[in-house]
Structure formats: structure tokens, C-alpha cells
Image (cartoon, rainbow, N blue to C red):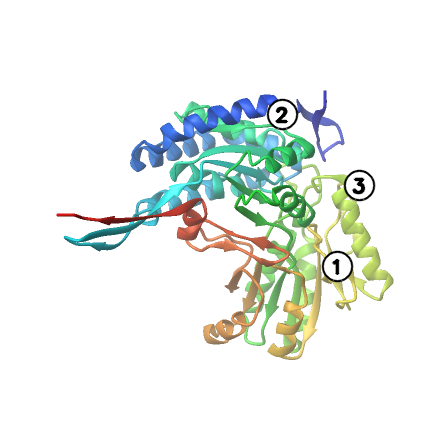
Amino acid sequence: MTVLKCISPIDGGVFAERPVMGLDEVRAGLSRARTAQKKGAAKPLADRVAAVEAGVEALGAMGDEVVTELAHMMGRPVRYGGEFGGVKERAGYMAGIAESALAPIVTEDSDAFERRILREPHGVVFVIAPWNYPYLTAINTVAPALIAGNAVVIKHATQTLLAGERMVRAFTNAGIPEDLFQNVFLDHATSEALIAERAFDFINFTGSVGGGRAIEKAAAGTFTPLGLELGGKDPGYVMDDADLDWAVDTLMDAALFNSGQCCCGIERIYVAETLYDAFVEKAVEWASKLKLGNPLDAETTIGPMANVRFAATVRAQIEDALSKGAKGLVDPALFPADDGGAYLAPQILVDVNHNMEVMREESFGPVVGIMPVKDDEEAIALMNDCKYGLTASLWTNDPDRAARIGARIETGTVFMNRADYLDPSLCWTGCKETGRGGALSVIGFHNLTRPKSYHLRKTK
């Protein structure tokens, strides 16, 4: 029997383990999910909304227990609390717009014809959630999928093995039927086999580009709709009229919070030449004040990376950049907890260029490269010189300038004077190798349902 093991980055020990479910066991669960979905979709929308809101409240009530559990599983310091503020914000927004987002589109209602478009749930939605924000990322699909009348099957990353179990327990305790929302423990082979046999009616995956390719390959020929949020290398651009202190504080937090393990974290920064030296000086000062250590310690502001192999990737990128002429400005001596393993000191690199992996490939760790640029044209070219496109953060006091630049950036979301944030009223989406589809907003509901047209000709 294959056993999934969550290795804690705190000490390298096994924190949790669960046996992998067999194909027949999962198929039986999916059969029950399809039956439950029909019953759930028949309930009034208001009832489905209330049930999801109750589930979110029950999840939030788990409080400190889940915060400590996350620290053990993926290393986020307990001082930052859980993800439930964001979970409630996103689920609450989707609940609030559900009636209008799912309302019929009536094109004619006359004595002769009734013509309308309805939104119909896909059926069984498969959510494959990542480890970096296991509750926040999952709720983007779980809440609107259930509200729209789907059943949901969730599979979490092994690194946060218990998150799906927690989530389902909270929702079922709050009244969601247990067959309607199920947690599964699967290995890659079993997941791919189920996808290939069209066991699911919609699949949402947040994770690596390689994982997205594997899902697309497994789903080939099944015509199963997919939502994929994959890699990112999000840029920040600080223009000559930016509020410097505000830009430094926000961009450095976006680069280093959660040990840099944020889907829309800032991984490269371009600064107008006139502000470059001052920005770099303030950024180094900001990063040097962080405290690397055990995430269970309330004084720790940056914990270990979730896994030793993730830290190894970042170290390799830093070494590659240094060997090609880059300079690291954060003194490693300030971070004695750096053990060469999961505990990795933050680093700011200058004298970097796009021949270095750290400026092209996803780092997903506590490192950021900073380059000076002479004008907007150079900044736009550099921001677009990337195979990913999730968000871009523009810093200026001129909204028109930001809009003009934003229109030319190949990205899913354009921010002005903020970064590393997900607005539930906007579609969360990406382009290029960041993936396809979109979550949250009205478009999120549309992606979790299919249009069904009615053309009714009246005889009297």
C-alpha cells in the first residue's frame, strides 16, 4: 500500500501520513457524488449559499489549531495567523453575487417566444489544491462550485496533506452532505487514470507547469474543461514618480512573505534609474530586519521553505546568478538559522540580467533580482521577456500612465500601487505558461457552469 507522507520543514520529520486510495474506492465515492449533486442542485440557490457560508464559518472556527498545523506542514510562521480572513472575503463575495451571476439571460419573453440562456452546473468538480495557501486557493473554486450546484472532490498536495480533510470536515459538520463534498488521497498515477476516464466534469488545478501539462495530457480527448493556474515570475516596475517608501515596503513584502512562496509574489523588480540606488538601499534594509527561524516561534518573521528540494532550487538560482556577475546584498551572517536545507536566508540580487535563471525561471522562494531601467519602453520589454503571465505591479502616481503600460503587459492582472493580492470581484487568471481559465468574479461562476439555451415557441 502506498502511503503519502507530509515531511515537516521544521525538523524533517514525518508530520502526517495517509494511505493512497484505490481506483475502485474513488470510483464508488464519485458515484455517490453524482447522486448527491443532482439532489444538491435541485435545492434553492439561497439554501446552497447558506450552506457554504456555514461551512466557511466552521472552517474559521478551527482557528489556532489549523494555524499551528500549517506551520508544521509548510513552514509559515504562526505570527501571521491563518488564511481565514481571505477565505471568508472570497467566499462571501461569491455568495453575494451568486444570484445575479447565475441568473438567466432572457433574450425574449413575448406572446410568440420565450428565449433564454441558463447556467447549468458541470456535475462533479475536481479541485487539485497547492500547498502554499491550501485554504485560500481551494476556496476560490470550492465555494462557487458548491453554490452553483456542483459536487466537489478535493485533493490537496502531500505537503499540506491534512488541509482537504480539515476543509471537508468543517463543511460537512456545518450541513453540507458528505457525498457532495469529498476529500481524497491520491497519487499521481491514480489521479491521471481518473482524469483519462473522464471521471470528472471540470478540473481545477493550481500548481506547477509540469503538473498542468500532465493534467492536459491525461485529459486529452475527453473534452473535460480545465482551469489551470501554473507558474509565475511576477514583475514590479517602480517609475520615477513613485512613492518610494510605499513601493519598497509593499514590493519587498510581496517578494519575501511566506518565504517567497506566493502564487503572485514579486520575483523581479525594475526601477527607474533616478530611484534605483535609493530603492535598493531601502530594500536591503527592509530584508535585513527579517528573522529566520522556527515558524512556531512568535518572533519568527520568515520560516523555512516548505521542502528541502524547493530551497535547493532557489539556492541553485542564486549561485548561478552570482557566478555570472550578480551581487548578493543581504548579509548571510544576519541569518544564522540558514542550515543549507529548508531554512534559507532571504537575498536581494543586483547586477542581474535576463541571461540568469533567477530573472527568467520561477523561484518561488525568498530571493528577488532588481534591475535599473531607463524608461517605460525598456521596462515593458523586460516585463514581457518571460514565459509566464499572472500579475504585474506598477508604481506611479499617474493612473493613465499605468493603464497605458498595463495594456501592453502580457499578464492576467495589472496592479497599480499594490501587489500580491487577489480581488474576488476580478477574474483571477493568467496567460502564457501561467495557464488558462479564470476563478472568482462573475467569470468564475461562468467557468464552473455551462450555458444551456432554451428556445420555446408558443402555439397560443
In this view, the residue in front, 301 or 129, is: 129
Q: Which of marks 1 and 2 is nearer the N terminus?
A: 2
Amino acid carrying label 2: it is: Leu
Q: Determine which residue is flagged by label 3.
A: 341
Amino acid carrying label 1: it is: Val
| Residue 225 left/right relative to 69 | left
Q: Determine which residue is flagged by label 1.
A: 358
In this view, the residue in front, 201 or 350, is: 201
Residue at left 60%, top 42%? 219
Location of residue 52 (image quadrant): top left
Q: Is the C-beta separation of discs 1 and 2 under 8 Å? A: no
Question: Distance of mark 1 from mark 2, alpha carbons?
Answer: 40 Å
| Residue 293 left/right relative to 111 | right
Amino acid carrying label 3: it is: Gly
Judged by depth in the image, the label closer to the viewer, 1 or 3, is 1
* Label 3 residue SS: loop
Residue 428 position within the rendered picture, expressed as x and y whole percent measured from the top left = 50, 53
Residue 329 position within the rendered picture, expressed as x and y whole percent measured from the top left = 77, 61
Q: Determine which residue is flagged by label 2.
A: 23
Residue at left 72%, top 57%? 361
Residue 386 position within the rendered picture, expressed as x and y whole percent measured from the top left = 67, 64
